[in-house]
Image: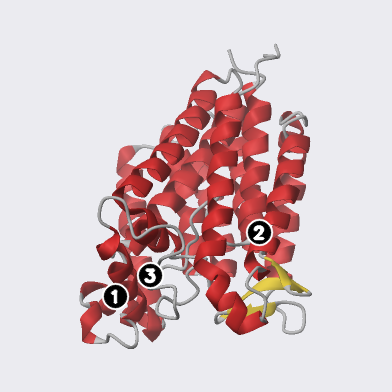
């Protein structure tokens, strides 16, 4: 039975976060944009376009019955895998910041790994709703979905994009956990996962440098520890009310590309503790409303789908904030709704549209 109530609180929270993100993208990027493109409004105009497209798609998707994704989940996942393979081919995929993870369209770029995250959540939600009592069986229940997840993770790591791959894997683990994954199996796979991460670090020296720089960034202040140190220098002077909008010092060619992964550092510098509280409150509001929709959904597929999307966004947000304040190594993960990036914002808005449609079928 459809619920005619519109989740205005969730919509307003998402729009406020996105608008604030646009404002901060301008503040943090106009110096870089002037230097690189001779246009201080370059990133602002792009993000405004992404936001408008995202809003339109969110509205359209919110009116599409989410149960159609159940029907086409296999095809969606196959398409995502094909895109992940195509992006690895020189001449088709383009390299940015050392990763071949983009399809270049003029000055814009599409990141297929963002689509893969959503596609895998849809597929896993269908799998779990079709096999509600299989999470205690490794071979018939857990193994199939883990094999698919690790295969997609492997394709993303070939780009390489460790941050996105980590979010994808942790989101699926979260889904398996709430589906009733036996805690003993959970611990076993956790041990295997830790060993796998150690292996990935050993085969790629730059990851080891990031670990070492995280433990002591001042051991290489002009190299691997540079971003963390500059981020901390940005957060430190913010105080209670910040230096004021547009008055950040670190965005003056100290903090690299401050409009992306480390935009929260600029927010902290310009708006201080008060700004952090406001943004954190908006994030908590959005996540609370989304989780509430998941809890009230009658349909098992819709429940898993809305939870998977929400948990993925929560984990990505926490991961980004932990990097910014120096709690974990740099992962290259953006802050949802706030950081500059078309693929990230558009897919996130589409995901919110799916949750809004699921809310129409809640109790």
Secondary element under disc 1, as helix, strand or loop, is helix
Secondary element under disc 2, as helix, strand or loop, is helix
**Disc nearest the viewer among 2 and 3:** 2
Distance of label 1 from label 3 (alpha carbons): 11 Å
Q: Residues within 10 Å of mark 3 (few under 14, many from 20)?
A: many
Task: Determine the image quadrant of residue 327.
Answer: bottom left
Q: Which residue is mark 3?
A: 330
Mark identifier at residue 37: none
Q: Which residue is mark 1?
A: 229
Q: Is residue 141 above or below residue 346?
A: above
Task: Determine the image quadrant of residue 213.
Answer: bottom left
Q: Residue at x 60, y 17 (%)?
A: 362
Mark sitting earlier along the chain (2/1): 2
Left or right position of 188 against 20 = left
Mark sitting earlier along the chain (1/3): 1
Q: Which residue is mark 2?
A: 47
Quarter of the rendering occupied by the C terminus: top right
Q: Is residue 328 above or below residue 38?
A: above
Q: Are marks 1 and 3 in contact (CB under 8 Å)?
A: no
């Amino acid at each position: 039975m459809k619920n005619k109530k519109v989740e205005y609180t969730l919509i307003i929270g998402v729009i406020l976060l996105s608008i604030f993100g646009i404002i901060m993208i301008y503040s943090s990027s106009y110096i870089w944009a002037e230097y690189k493109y001779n246009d201080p409004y370059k990133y602002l105009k792009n993000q405004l376009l992404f936001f408008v497209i995202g809003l339109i798609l969110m509205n359209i998707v919110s009116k599409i019955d989410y149960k159609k994704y159940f029907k086409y989940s296999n095809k969606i996942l196959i398409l995502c895998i094909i895109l992940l393979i195509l992006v690895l081919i020189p001449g088709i995929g383009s390299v940015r910041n050392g990763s071949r993870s983009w399809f270049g369209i003029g000055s814009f770029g599409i990141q297929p790994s963002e689509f893969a995250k959503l596609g895998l959540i849809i597929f896993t939600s269908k799998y779990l709703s079709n096999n509600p009592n299989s999470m205690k069986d490794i071979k018939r229940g857990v193994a199939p979905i883990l094999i698919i997840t690790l295969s997609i993770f492997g394709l993303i790591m070939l780009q390489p994009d460790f941050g996105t791959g980590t979010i994808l894997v942790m989101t699926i683990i979260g889904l398996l956990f709430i589906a009733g994954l036996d805690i003993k199996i959970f611990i076993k796979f956790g041990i295997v996962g830790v060993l796998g991460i150690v292996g990935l670090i050993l085969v790629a020296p730059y990851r080891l440098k990031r670990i070492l720089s995280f433990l002591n960034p001042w051991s290489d202040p002009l190299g691997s520890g540079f971003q963390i140190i500059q981020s901390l220098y940005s957060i430190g002077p913010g105080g209670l009310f910040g230096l004021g909008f547009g008055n950040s010092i670190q965005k003056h060619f100290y903090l690299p590309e401050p409009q992306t992964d480390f935009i929260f550092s600029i927010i902290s510098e310009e708006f201080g503790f008060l700004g952090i509280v406001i943004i954190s409150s908006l994030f908590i509001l959005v996540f609370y409303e989304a989780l509430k929709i998941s809890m009230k959904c009658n349909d098992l597929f819709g429940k898993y789908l809305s939870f998977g999307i929400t948990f993925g966004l929560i984990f990505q947000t926490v991961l980004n904030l932990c990097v910014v304040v120096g709690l974990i190594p740099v992962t290259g993960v953006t802050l949802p709704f706030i950081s500059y990036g078309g693929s990230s914002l558009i897919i996130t808005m589409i995901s919110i549209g799916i949750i809004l449609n699921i809310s129409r079928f809640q109790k």
